[in-house]
Amino acid sequence: MRLSKSSLLVILALGAILIGTGYTSLISPASAQKKRTIHCNYPFEEPSNVQRTLRLNKFGIIINIPANYRAMAAVDGSIHFTDNGTYQLLNCLKNNPGATGGREYNAIIVDKSKANYLYSNVYDKVPGKENMFIVWEKTEHDNYTSHKISLRIKTNKGIMEVSLSESYPVMHEQDVKNEIRSIIQIAQGIQII
């Protein structure tokens, strides 16, 4: 069947209008297929009792982390150590724009300190560790106080901080004590190089 020139122009014009308005599925059978939504659903893994040792020359430390934790370099220069399930979840979301999924994110974060003074907000020294300090920062909000606990380390690369990411702000005294115990436990597995 042969189309007249005017019929061909009408079909081309209609095609251009449909493409311009997003109705390409009428023209292309391949694009008519419904896009499958990717759901990133990877469960949290409890920290392993087995430890592995990593040397972080950039930060001037050697750190022990659970064997099932993976390292992720963040845009701000920090390193996040998180469980394998969370690592897979974050990679799935990064590699699949528009994917669904998400949950709390717990990690050990190593970063250069933003403090301009080594002893700013220092609460205590880490027992048995030179140049390691527990930092307790309090932030007043309208009707509560949040607390951030971290480990500050003086190294030959500068002042570093190790902290735990939390899904919710630490607000209660018992939570602060638990956080301090966790930071001291991490400090026991760190050496300054």
Image (cartoon, rainbow, N blue to C red):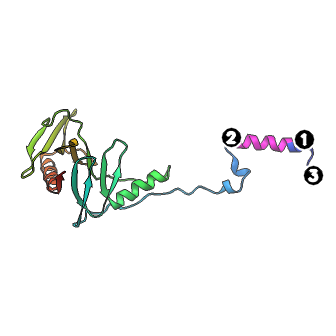
Instruction: Looking at the picture, tell me which residue is in the foreground, 98 or 62.
Output: 62
Residue range in magenta is 9-21
The residue at the far left in this view is 128
Secondary structure mostly taken by the magenta-highlighted segment of the chain: helix
SS state under label 1: helix
Q: Nearer the viewer, mark 2 or mark 3?
A: 3
Q: Locate residue 40, reporting x and y percent.
A: 44, 57
Spot occupied by residue 187 in the image (x, y as percentages of width and height):
15, 53
State the mark number for residue 35. none
- Asked whether the residues under the numbered discs 2 and 3 touch, taking CB atoms below 8 Å apart as contact, a structural biologist would say no
Residue located beneath label 1 in the image: 6
Callout 2: SS: loop
Q: Amino acid at mark 1?
A: Ser
Q: Quadrant of residue 84?
A: bottom left
Q: Nearer the viewer, residue 183 or 1?
A: 183
Residue 141, quarter of the rendered image: top left
Reading the chain from its start, which is encountered first: label 2 or label 1?
Answer: 1
Q: Which mark is residue 21?
A: 2
Q: How many angstroms separate mark 2 from mark 3 (CA)?
A: 28 Å
Say whether residue 129 is left or right of residue 41: left
Q: Which residue is mark 3?
A: 2
Q: Which numbered disc, 2 or 3, marks the residue that appears first in the sequence?
A: 3
In this view, the residue in front, 42 or 160, is 160
Circles 1, 3 touching at the beta carbon (< 8 Å):
no
Q: Is residue 192 left or right of residue 30?
A: left
Report, in whole angstroms, how far the alpha carbon at label 1 lies from the one at label 3: 12 Å
The residue positioned 45% from the left and 51% from the top of the image is 94
